[in-house]
Amino acid sequence: MLATTSPQAFIEQPSIKEQSQARGLIEWRKTLDQQLDELLAGGEKIRDVVHARAQAIDDMLRLLWEQHELPHHNLALLAVGGYGRSEMLPYSDVDILILSRHDIEPELGEKISGFVSSLWDTGFKPGISVRSLTECLEAAQDITVATTLVESRLVAGDEQLAKKPRQIVSTAWTDKTFFQEKMLEQQRRYAQHNNTESNLEPDVKNAPGGLRDLNQIGWIAKRHFRVVRVYDLVHLGFISEFELRELEDAEDFLWQVRYQLHRIAGRDENRLLFDYQRDVAARLGYVQQEDDAPNHAVEQFMKTYYRVAMKVSTLNEMLLAYFFESVIEPRLTDEEKPHRSSINERFDMIGGKIAVTHHRVFSQTPSALLELFYIMASQPEITGIRAKTLRLLMLAAKTIDDNFRANPVHRAMFMAILRAPHNLYETLHAMKRYGVLGKYIPAFGQIIGLMQYDLFHIYTVDAHTLLLIRNLRRFGKPEFAKDYPVVSSVFQRLDRKEIVYLAAIFHDIAKGRGGDHSELGAEDAIEFCRNHGLTEREGKIVAWLTRNHLVMSITSQKKDISDPDIVKDFADHMGDMVHLDYLYSLTVADINATNPKLWNSWRASLMRQLYTQARDIIRSGLDRPVDHQLIIDDTKFEAMQTLSNQYAYEDIEKIWCEMGDDYFLKERADEVVWHTQAMIEHGDNPDPLVLIREHRKLAKDTAEIFVYTRDLPNLFAASVAVLDQMDLNVQDARIITAAKAFSLDTYIVLDRFGTLLSDTDRQGEVIYALTNALSRPEEFPTLLERRIPRQLRHFAVQTEVSIHLNTALQQNIVEIMTLDQPGLLAKIGGLFMMQGLDIHSARIATLGERAEDSFYVTKRDGIPMTPDESKAFAHKLQLALDEASQVVSVVQ
């Protein structure tokens, strides 16, 4: 144990006033903190530092115990909880129990009160309970109290009395009831953290894979085996030496992280927030090199964290299941014991879990390592793996090597798993968790725990990949068809579904290597497919999907898919319906597995629209050119059929003649009807007209806001500023200027509160705010100050601006990627206005902390910018947005 300065040296004799004593102990604590920090920084083991702090606090408490003349008989000072385990970090609570054999007399009570007061005065944060034996037995009926008593440790007082807490727990709880209650408690704790180790900002103490999972093993095992140290469980055969080392290594790492969190936050902080991740990474030695990617160091640190957390939760699962099977299960009645049935000569099923028939199954038959998972994926009644089998499995997984991977039997077995009818996601998840998948596909092993330091990818790469496969499987189930009606029918038509499963496995498998992960992943996919019996054509489709897995999402979200030429280019890239169907299924599953908040009815409608339009082009023949005039004529004819029942032909034509062909080329007929009706009814009224309706044809939870007003500078900036203030997120914008200098604008918005379409008062507020602003757009945007979300402050997004010419439209396409921030669209609109540019349409995408927006613009005379003008404006735009991003990043 490390030696630290004694608290005795910092306080005066008992005759000196208590105030002076408290000041001395506060100084001692500061010295203790400094000593331990220096020892840790100098390379001392975190385990020794953690225990040294607990020992030093023991010394202080003993000193105070003596000074307050508390007895050593019939009264005991016990450390409980983390302090009872001698695990103290800088701001850990000092949890103590003062246990009395009898009811406490008033005179003794006064001494105890003085002791407690002096402890508070030292600056520690004590958690104090004072109980008699009778009160302690009553309190132990609560599982939380019972848990603290399991790890009670004598600090001062009656040694015989110190043995009572564990006896009390054994009286209050049986092995079975204690185990059951602790497992329920763990389930509730897991649920509070989304049942995953891979949260973006994990709680290193309470989340799955955190320190509580290690404590849980100790609580249950210590209570049954009556041991004080986890190490003693090795001699009892409960855990192996290897498992103990794994547990201690994981605990050391988590203690290091938690220690630095306490120091950085200056309090008992357990959440690894974005605010702290970079600093913790640096303190633990993850250094950013000049040639590294911008977030390399913090991503490597978090990769280590996630791997450690997965290891901890897996050991927790295995050891607690082993405890149940070896301790609880033998005591069950015959009716309660799980039923055993034979699967084959290698495996049985016991109570819904698969088990080996003997302990040499994997060594005698290596293919059984994959056969076990094939059985799991083929028999839905199997819900897991027995603990003893799991122990053997995790050891056998370490033997997977090139020879194992090259074995034709093993290759066939892996493909059989992908083709199995049930539980593919659950099976692959188990293969990853227990060390098989990462060993069988080494490239997959490299992405386990790999995170991307942003708000867009909310899962680690491995977790995202398996969730993608889960989503694909859901497309084939009737209960999910209502949520994904089009893609479900498309997926169910796929002949070889293992093709898209393999594309899912390989689509992100090359992340973190440097270079284009899509290209590198395609190369890996080709080799894997050749080795696993797929035909040359099938392998090429898997590689093509891997290489092009982002094409459909980029086209639908960042390009103007109302432009027939853009859709034709996309259809040409697909080539046939086979590639389109596979890519559509993969893309929808991919977006939903990246960040569930990204998938909404608007994105679904864009994807569906692109798919159906490309499908029609492919079916009609890719060699047929786009007939722009036919599209224009069809749109006009369909709109006229509706409008002619209400208005004179001359009134309709008067409006239409002010619109260019591009309007009828891109707008649907029902949009043309809505716009025409509004303009005819509004007549020559100079006041702005604002209407709101559900975006009926495409996205049921989006609203379509129609604005008809005089064409003035700053209309776009003023409009989006108001929409932002009204908590509406703009997804799409189309701005059309009629010949008589009126602007016809349509905004597709999502409501952050989800009330716009149902609350008429809120609709009225939006209409009033827009009408008021557009009556005097030169005064807008007068942006309200909005709180910058905490998480955004910790990301530095380098602004990228590109401007190129769309020759068909004779418009400049301005593509912007920058840090998302309140009022961003209004800021961009203001910059366009100052440059003398008119916005004709916009496509808005927010991906985590990044805004990726596209604008179609011309100069005021309708002419696009020259190359030199584009270059100069791109530079100006980048400087302005970079400056705004820097302001956001430093605001605290």
Image (cartoon, rainbow, N blue to C red):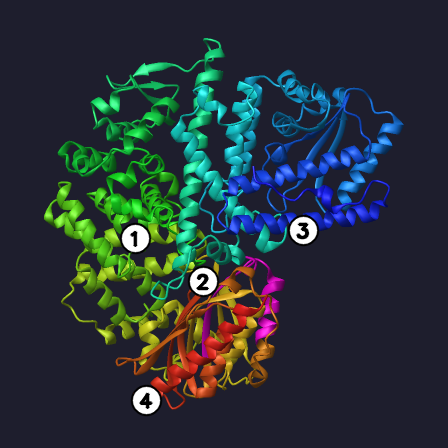
Q: Residues within 10 Å of mark 1 (few under 14, many from 20)?
A: many
Q: Which of the two residues, 188 or 147, is positioned nearer the viewer here?
A: 147
Q: Secondary structure at mark 4?
A: helix
Q: Which of the two residues, 813 or 209, is positioned nearer the viewer here?
A: 209
Q: What's the residue type where badge 4 is placed?
A: Asp
Q: Position of residue 819 (x, y in %)?
A: 46, 68
How far apart in space, not on screen, are marks 4 and 2 (Cα)? 40 Å
Magenta range is 744-770
Q: Position of residue 560 (x, y in %)?
A: 33, 70
Instruction: Return the residue at label 2.
Output: 695
Instruction: Return the residue at label 1.
Output: 508
Q: Secondary structure at mark 1?
A: loop
Whether residue 103 is visible, yes or no, is yes
Give the mark toward the camera: 2 or 1: 1
User: As displayed, is residue 724 above or below residue 2?
Assistant: below
Q: Residues within 10 Å of mark 2 (few under 14, many from 20)?
A: some
**Mark 4 vs mark 1: which is more N-terminal?**
1
Disc ID at residue 868 = 4
**Mark 4 vs mark 3: which is more N-terminal?**
3
In the rendered image, residue 762 lying in the magenta stretch gets the answer yes
**Mark 2 vs mark 3: which is more N-terminal?**
3
